[in-house]
Amino acid sequence: MEENIWGEALSQFNRAANILKLDDQVVELLTNPKRIIQVSIPVRMDNGKIKVFQGFRVQFNDLRGPTKGGIRYHPNVTLDEVKALSFWMTWKNVVADVPFGGAKGGVICNPKEFSQGELERLSRGYIEAMHKFIGAEKDIPAPDVYTNPQVMAWMVDEYHRIEGHNVFGMITGKPLELGGSQGRAEATAQGGIYVLEEAIKKIGVKKPLIAIQGFGNAGKIVARLLSKSGFKIVAVSDSKTGIYKQDGLDVERVIAHKEKTKSLQGFKGVKEITNEELLELYVDILIPAALEGVITAKNVENIRAKIILELANGPVSAEARERLYAKGQVSIPDILANSGGVTVSYFEWVQNNMGYFWKEEEVLEKLKEKMVVAFDNVYSASKEFKVDLGTAAYIYAIKTMVKVLEYRGYIKR
């Protein structure tokens, strides 16, 4: 994103901290990461040469339980980004009421250029470098950008090789055959929908028109699930283009085209639009499901949707959220909207610890219960303090963390 991502993360926190008149020592305790780990990962490439990659893991806060957060492989990974994402994970876990702290990991690389063998050696190398700092009771990684269940499987196997025994709970997002959970693949999208349904009830939107920016994993799944539930999706986009049809898109045909051609370009019977144009459409619900920082002070006045569901991490700046609220629009913050993923990751961890697994219906029922309670908590804080939902989420989470600090003896009760 254009703005400094760590600065944006702090900005969101500070808005809530100022309203709560938070003591400086509490701010200091809650805004400094417990541990920052940077490692060099040597990987033998297919051409026989060794290439060294830089890997990161930031464990922000473990006062509520082991830290938790994904590992991303991307050429633009930075320590600032990983730190900000681990900070967001801390608050997301509080809002979702799962007993984890926040963490995040990343490797600076372009996995699209790797063979399968190179990807496996990098993934095993990351665990070899980090294994002392992670584990089922310490820090639990998961998939993120350009990592997937196969990467998690290599990682759990490498951890097994080092430790000498299986510890399936040391990582989540695994294949079902290696202790993964039913419902995990759809969890982020499905959790977002449960929250969206609650928001629609509160705001009273009837027969909403929906636009989705981003047609990767989360965007594609949320489009499919909403379409199956009878919602009308009028626009979707990927990194190259967007498509719009006022009467509604045939989502299954769009998905088939995307999977076949790897792009939305060339889909028949629609108007092609840019990502920027999609954001500014006259729709009831806008779902940014791809990039950080797509709605900021620069374009917020052009956003027309009544409800914005932040399925991506950090798609709406704190300032933009506040301005949307002033215009009577609702932006459901990422730390609430996309917390379904970490919630089902928590369920996976619980199932690994028990050695007993739930059916998909049971997982989704438990997910819905948690998401509805999380929305109600944030919505109540929004009403009580007369602030946007993003600020309200941080107010709720900070108040919870202050109690944790008091009980653990960091500050006086």
Image (spheres, grey):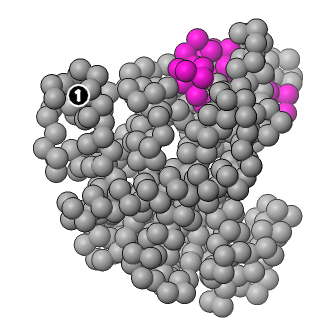
Residue 10, relative to residue 196: is it above or below?
Answer: above
Residue at position x 14%, y 34% from top? 23
In percent of width and height, residue 361 lies at 70, 56
**Mostly what secondary structure, the magenta segment?**
helix
- In the depicted view, which residue is nearer to us: 280 or 208? 208
| Residue 169 makes an appearance in the image | yes
Q: In this image, 253 relative to 400: left or right?
A: right
Residue 342 in which image quadrant: top right
Residue 62, relative to residue 372: is it above or below?
Answer: above
Residue at position x 30%, y 40% from top? 400
Residue 10, relative to residue 198: is it above or below?
Answer: above
In percent of width and height, residue 167 lies at 70, 20
In percent of width and height, residue 185 lies at 70, 50
What is the magenta range? 116-142
Label 1 Cα crowd, 10 Å radius (few <14 / some 14-19 / many 20+): few
Q: In this image, 201 relative to 187: left or right?
A: left
- In the depicted view, which residue is nearer to us: 134 or 115? 134
Residue at position x 48%, y 40% from top? 98
Residue 6, relative to residue 405: is it above or below?
Answer: below
In percent of width and height, residue 8 lies at 34, 47
User: What is the total number of numbered labels drawn onto the structure image?
Assistant: 1
Indicate yes or no whether the magenta region holds residue 286. no
Residue 350 in which image quadrant: top right
Q: Disc 1 designates what residue?
A: 406
| Residue 334 makes an appearance in the image | no
Residue 269 in which image quadrant: bottom right
Image quadrant for the C terminus? top left
Residue type pointed to by label 1: Glu
Residue at position x 23%, y 28% from top? 406
Q: In this image, 90 relative to 326: left or right?
A: right
Q: Secondary structure at mark 1?
A: helix
